Amino acid sequence: MAEPAEPTETAEPAPGTDPSPRRGPVRLAEVAAAAGVSLATASRVLNGSHRSVGEPHRGRVLAAAAELGYRANPHAQAIARGASNIVGLVVHDISDPYFSAIADGVMRQCEQRGLVVVMASTRRDPERELDYVATLRAQRARAVIIVGSRTRSRDLTARLAKELAGFSESGGRVACISQNRLGTHTVLVQNRAGARELARELARLGHRRLAVLTGPPELLTARDRHAGFVEGLRDSGLPDEAVRAVPGPFTRDGGYAAATELVTAGLDVTCVFAVNDVMAVGAMAAFRDHGLAIPQDVSVAGFDDIRTLRDLVPSLTTVGLPLEEMGERAAALALDTEPGERPRTVRVRGEVVLRDSTSRVR
Amino acid sequence: MAEPAEPTETAEPAPGTDPSPRRGPVRLAEVAAAAGVSLATASRVLNGSHRSVGEPHRGRVLAAAAELGYRANPHAQAIARGASNIVGLVVHDISDPYFSAIADGVMRQCEQRGLVVVMASTRRDPERELDYVATLRAQRARAVIIVGSRTRSRDLTARLAKELAGFSESGGRVACISQNRLGTHTVLVQNRAGARELARELARLGHRRLAVLTGPPELLTARDRHAGFVEGLRDSGLPDEAVRAVPGPFTRDGGYAAATELVTAGLDVTCVFAVNDVMAVGAMAAFRDHGLAIPQDVSVAGFDDIRTLRDLVPSLTTVGLPLEEMGERAAALALDTEPGERPRTVRVRGEVVLRDSTSRVR
DNA sequence: CTGTTAGCGCATTCAC
DNA sequence: GTGAATGCGCTAACAG
């Protein structure tokens, strides 16, 4: 039995040296008392950044703290210093692998810095996004990271920008991932360029009649990818009539519905580009359900290169994005930057990955 | 005048009635002053639960608050009332769809109650899990929800249980999802029963020689599913020698590696059960890479029924779990329960879903 | 270097 | 009902 007298399963009433069995966590004052120093001194060694405590004391405080299992109350610290150690992370939908991958990166970065992340999933409701930012502002979050495409709505964007500006003015840092319309630091995804490059590759494979499942018309990311794709086709000498657009939700079901619509209307294209992988998956399912083989009957391409979807069959042609890294960079951007600093933008290129869901047209 | 001169795009220096352009969020005191009432009164109408403020005042406070855009400082509230509005959510890996689906449910539930969720991803490191719980405890989180399998390690489990007990004793609520070895409320997944049922179905299809990719030996969830599977086979009259076990990580790559090992050693089974869908996907990829067709050459089954993986081809036979709902229930369990209450446990059954990745043996 | 003191923003007794 | 006073746990001047 390694683990002999494993202290009894129950609590820890501390032998006999504890005069007041105060419930709840130990406070700094108790540590100070136990170490025989002032509250200030204890605070300095335990939390104050600049060390300036003599060795006789320093050790005693540390020991006492360890013994009592002291943990600073972050709320008290937040209120006393006027700044918390909270980082807010606002995503459109945490159950979407695109966002959870990014979240992973953000959390990694925050953990390293001893920051706590408050996560909010807006479920694609811009109003909720606004509300969460307000909440985070009230929390005196140290930084807020907004992930997800902006919309065309000037109003919504302006309101969010204003809220963020207010937050930022009172010392909070902000970073966004997607477009840089918010006047903040941002990790700018080059959707346009990626889609354009993808289109060229597809044209090179011989496709002359294509369709793009464009996602929601108001989502900038969706629009940019669509626009970039059309540009790429033009670059390749194809007329604008060569491409057909079908809008729909940015989800798997949205992709399914859009593809179905395409088939129902009499599929007259050899290749379909869904503006994100999740939609592409839905589209592939729809085509299959209609007896169409991929890529023999129709080629399909997506965007994002979601890890969980890498093992699809046929493997999905897409534009790869370094999701986790984007999250890390956004966090770093917000955290390593001076409060008043001019907005920086880090560009992230997508890399076209040709796989089996697209084939050369005969 | 419904919002006439929409204050200029910039900050809001308030026309001419504001003597001190104090930076940062407005405080309760300012609202009280603006409304011409005491701080206490303002506090009562804005935050105090039991209303007891006369109508002349009540309205004024509300108006002032709205006008100034007042938002209570949650840290100050936390410290004043000794309890925060934070709910801690600890998962093994947020980028794993199993966890992000559950997280979605938890967040939904918390949002409804106006609670904020602090999320932590341990990246499958038990020590980190312990540490996060301690952090959450220090935060005076209102509740902590631990998601993910426990391990066989008595030591680790005991330490976590102890930490949770301490947290719970000081008024925090706790709920777990997976096993109920922590002495807390728990959403208990009936892994054993689900796997057993799956095994029976597979046996019914005629499989007589099977393998299970067991995942990490120390993970209880993995062991339970493995054990249940073996039981189900026994139920069907198969000898224990009928099933072969291959351990490995609980991930896609773990599944790939385990399946490869199986093939390399000379595949002598007709069906492989990976203890979760993500591993199953890896296994399918491995089989394909070795030229094996699914389900013709080998049937594959998983567990969880991850939504993102529902469109795999061939579609994956698995045991479905109501992930989002599990998250919601865990949150409700923790939040709707009295602090001292006896641990409740909500059982969740998995439902076998036979799809195309498994076929009748000829 | 160390102890004293004054807040941080808010909830809450306690008198009025 | 309403206001004044106290305290929550900790940090940050400010003096010794």
Image (tube, coloured by chain):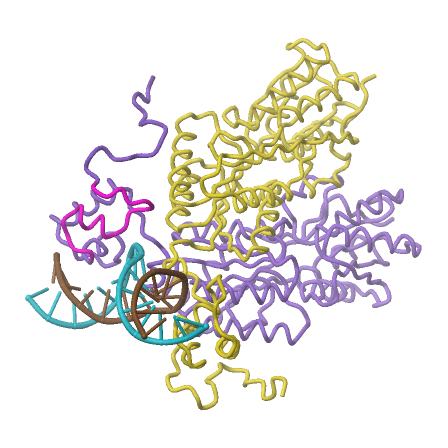
Chain colours: A purple, B yellow, C brown, D cyan
Is residue B195 placed above or below A226 in the rendered structure? above
Residue A336 visible, this orientation:
no
- Residue A106: where, in percent of width, then height? 50, 53
Q: What residue occupies the far right of the structure in this picture?
A: A266
Q: How many marks?
A: 0
Of A299 and A74, nearer the camera is: A74
Of C13 and A358, nearer the camera is: C13
Q: Toward which corner of the image does residue B209 lie, by quadrant?
A: top right
Residue B81 in magenta?
no
Q: Toward which corner of the image does residue B215 lie, by quadrant?
A: top right
Residue B19 visible, this orientation:
yes
Which quadrant would the C terminus of chain B be assigned to in this image?
A: top right
Residue under the point 42% across and 33% down: B161
Which quadrant would the N terminus of chain B be assigned to in this image?
A: bottom right
Q: Toward which corner of the image does residue A214 lie, by quadrant?
A: bottom right
- Residue A311: where, in percent of width, then height? 68, 39
- Residue A49: where, in percent of width, then height? 26, 58
Is residue A54 placed above or below A151 in the rendered structure? above
Q: Which residues are magenta?
A: A19-39
Of A67 and A347, nearer the camera is: A67
Q: What residue occupies the far bottom of the structure in this picture?
A: B16
Residue under the point 32% across and 25% down: A6
Is residue A43 placed above or below A70 in the rendered structure? below
Q: Could you tell whether B292 is left or right of A57 in the image?
A: right
Q: Could you tell whether B128 is left or right of D8 in the image?
A: right
- Residue B203: where, in percent of width, then height? 75, 17
